[in-house]
Structures are given as C-alpha cells and as structure tokens.
Image (cartoon, helix red, strand yellow):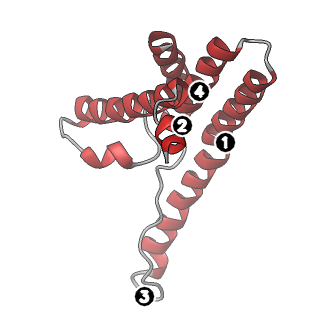
Amino acid sequence: MYSFVLLFQNPILITAVAAWFSAQTLKIIVVMVLTKKIDFKRFISAGGMPSSHSALVTSMATAIGKIEGWSSPITALAVVVALIVMYDAAGVRRSAGKQAEVINKIIEEFLRPQRLIKEERLKELIGHTPTEVFAGGILGIIIANILI
C-alpha cells in the first residue's frame, strides 16, 4: 500500500497531471473568452485549445529529462511517446473528428428525416489543429520547468 502512496508523490507524475489540469482549465477560459459563456464540460472533454494530451506528454518528457538526464534511454523513450501522442492528436484524431462531422451531416440531412436511423450524434471535437498541439506542448514544457 505504501508503494501506491509513493506513486502520487512522484514529481514526474505530479508535473504531468499539473500540465493536464492547466491545459484543461485554459480550455474553459478560451471558450469563455470566445463565446462569453462558461462551459465546465470542456474540463473533461477532448479537443480544443490547448491540447491537454500534448501538455501532459511534453511535461512528462521534460521532467524525465531534467531528473534522469537528457541522454538517458528513459528520456528518449518519453520523447518518442510524446511525439507519437502529438502526431496522433493532430493527425488521426483530428481526421476522425472531421469524419464524424460529415457523418453527422449525412444523418441529419438524409437519414433522420426518413426515420431510418435513431443513433445519437458522433463526437466531432476529438482532435486538435497543429496550433493547439503546439500550444499544449509549449505549456507542458513550461509547467515542467516551473515544477522541476
């Protein structure tokens, strides 16, 4: 049990969670500035500015690099994982969101009026623009440098 408690005292994990929390909080602020409405659902949703996935993995990689050394194998692994997550956020997940948008339009315009389908809408905001990924990555690096 004590080992499990130690996990939550790990500075790398604390840094990564702080970066994720900061990114999710910033999403609420960005939406509030743009729409003049507070949407707390943005705190637990994917997509939007900045990318919390990117913030989490870049803060993790930065924290590992600062603690374990920039030439360590674990730092290299963390950087590779961060790059994969960031590529996925701006590539695969963004494409899936665009496809969901098209499918939702098809359902609304052609299938739902004829009562051929009763499925709920697909989630459209699941990926990120390259700018959102970059902003999340920078945020993660900043958070790690502040906390470590």
Of mark 4 and mark 3, the one earlier in the sequence is: 4
Percent position of residue 53, x then y: 54, 37
Circle 2 residue: 53
Amino acid beneath label 1: Asp
In the rendered image, residue 130, in percent from the top left (x then y), is placed at: 59, 29
Q: In this orientation, which residue lies closer to the viewer: 93 or 45?
A: 45
Q: Quick one: 43 or 4, which is closer to the camera?
A: 4
- Mark 3, residue position: 114
Most distant residue in the front direction: 2
| Residue 64 shows in this picture | yes
Residue 147, placed above or below residue 11: above
Residue that carries the numbered disc 1 in the rendered image: 88
User: Which mark's residue is nearer the viewer, 4 or 3?
Assistant: 4
- Amino acid bearing label 2: His
- Label 4 amino acid? Met
Disc 1 is placed on an element classified as helix
Pointer 4 residue: 60
Which quadrant would residue 59 be assigned to in this image? top right
Residue 76 in the image: above or below residue 142: below
Q: Which of marks 1 and 2 precedes in the sequence?
A: 2
> Amino acid under label 3?
Gln
Frontmost of labels 1 and 3 is 1
Where residue 48 appears, x then y in whole percent? 43, 38
Image quadrant where residue 38 sits: top left
Q: Residue at x 52, y 31 (%)?
A: 13
Q: Nearer the viewer, mark 2 or mark 4?
A: 4
Mark 2 packing: few (<14 Cα in 10 Å), some, or many (20+)?
many
Cα gap from disc 3 to disc 2, whole angstroms: 40 Å
Camera-side mark, 1 or 4: 4
